[in-house]
Amino acid sequence: MSHIHPKTTPIYQTSVFTFEDLDALEQYFDEPGQSYMYTRYQNPNTDELAQEISELEQGAGAMVTSSGTSALLAAVLTLCKAGDHVLYAEEIYGGSSSLLVQELSRMGLEVSAVPTVDTYTLDKYVQPNTRLLLAETMSNPLLQVLDTQRLAAETKRHNIRLVIDNTFATPILTKPLVLGADIVIHSITKYLSGHSDVTAGVVVCGQADDLERVRKVVKIYGLNLSPFEGWLAARGLKTLRLRMKQHSSNALILAKYLQDHPKVERVWYPGLADHPQHELAKRQGQGMFGGMMSFRIKDEVAAVNRFMQALEHIPFAPSLAGVTTSVSHPLGTSHRSLSAEEQQKLGITVGVIRLSVGIEEPEELIADLEQALEQV
Ligand SMILES: Cc1ncc(COP(=O)(O)O)c(C=O)c1O
C-alpha cells in the first residue's frame, strides 16, 4: 500500500507488530527506533506524541505514560531507589503528594515536604540520601508561582535533581528544562490534550541517559499509554498554542471581574497585579498567566452548593484545562486526601473554588458567574 500517504498519522491500534523472520527481529534490536515490536514498549502514536511534546519543551526526548500520576511514578523510579530521599514543594497536587507520602514511602523511599517559603534555600532539608526536589511551575490550586531558574540553581548547589510538574503552565508559557530543570512531567490529561477526553502523562528529559532509564521503567512497570489516547492527545496538542493564548486572556478578564465582585473574598491568579509573584509569573510565562485560578466565596457548604447549582453553563467537574470552562472544589476533590491540618495550612477551605477558564467568549462566562454569585 505504498501509494497511500495519509496527512495525519493513522492510529496503530495494535498490541504487537510482526516480523518477517529472525533477521528482521535482529534488525529491531540492532537499529533502535527503526521498527516496533510490542506496544507496551513503544508504539508509533505514543512516540509521535512524545516527540512533539519533547520539542515543545526543548528536551532530549520524552516518554508518554498512562496518566500524569504514572508520569510522576516513572520519574521517581527513574531517579531513585529504596532508601533514597525525595523532597517536594508542599503546595503540589494532592494526588502527587499522596503517591509519594502514602505509597512510595511504603517501598522504602523517604519523603519530606518543603514549605513554599523555603524552596530556594534547601540546606535544612537536603540529606546525604536526597535525590530530587519535585515542584510545580504554578501550584494547584492556589497558583503560587515558583522561580524555576532559582530552584535549578539551588538543586544544582546540592547536587540533587529538579523535577518540575509543568501541567498548569505548559511549555507555551514556561520551558523548565531551558531554565535548568532536569526532568519535566505533565498530566497530558489537562492542557496538552485539552479536550477533557484523554487520560495521559509524559516525562520529558533534559538528558539522553535519563531518557533511556525512563524508557526502561515505563516498559518494565507497564506504565505505557494506549495508541488511541496517544492519537487523541497528539490531535489536541496541535492547537495548544492557540488555546493557551485564549485561556490566558479569558482568565485575566475573569480574574479582574471576580476581584471586584462583592461576594468574592479573594482571588488567586498570577495575572493580577497584587499576586505576590506577579512579576515573576509575567517573566516566566511570556506575559501569559494561564487559564487556572481559584477564588473564595463564603466558607459555607450551603453557599458553595447554591453557587454550583445556579451555574447554568459552567459544570462542577473535578478536573481542569479543557476547552470549556468548569469549576472544581479542591477541599472536596484534588486535596481531599490531605489531613485537615494540611488543608488548613495551605488555605484550602470550603469556600475555595477552582476555576478552569475555557476558550469561550468571556462575556458568556461572566454572565453565568454573575447570576450564580447572586445566589451566594
Ligand atoms: C498539577 C497536576 N499534576 C498531576 C496530576 C495528575 O494527573 P492525572 O490525573 O493525569 O494522573 C494532576 C491532576 O489533576 C495535576 O493537576
Image (cartoon, helix red, strand yellow):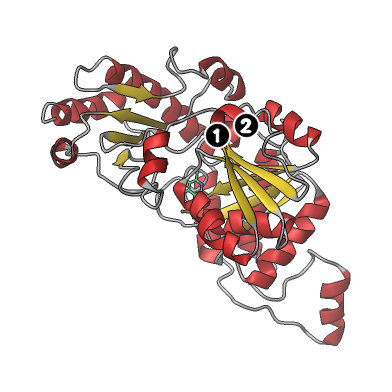
SS for tag 2?
loop
Task: Name the residue at 35% across, 42% down.
Answer: 330
Quarter the C terminus occupies = top left
Most distant residue in the front direction: 124
| Horizontal side of residue 162 vs 237, given as left or right | right
Task: Name the residue at 17% across, 28% down.
Answer: 373
Distance between the Cα atoms at labels 1 and 2? 7 Å
| Residue 75 seen in render | yes
| Whether residue 181 is situated above or below residue 37 in the rendered picture | above
Mark identifier at residue 186? none
Q: Is there a contact, CB below 8 Å, between mark 1 and mark 2? A: yes
| Residue 63 seen in render | no
Mark identifier at residue 115? 1
Image location of residue 21, percent across then percent down: 81, 87
Task: Name the residue at 78% across, 47% down.
Answer: 128
SS for tag 1?
loop
| Horizontal side of residue 304 vs 267, given as left or right | left
| Whether residue 254 is situated above or below residue 168 in the rendered picture | above
Image location of residue 371, percent across then percent down: 14, 28
Hey, what amino acid is under mark 1? Pro
Residue on which the image places disc 2: 119
Most distant residue in the bottom direction: 21
Image location of residue 321, percent across then percent down: 42, 41
Hey, what amino acid is under mark 2? Thr
Foreground residue, 355 or 122?
122
Q: Residues within 10 Å of mark 1 (few under 14, many from 20)?
A: few
| Horizontal side of residue 7 vs 128, given as left or right | left
| Whether residue 20 is situated above or below residue 133 in the rendered picture | below
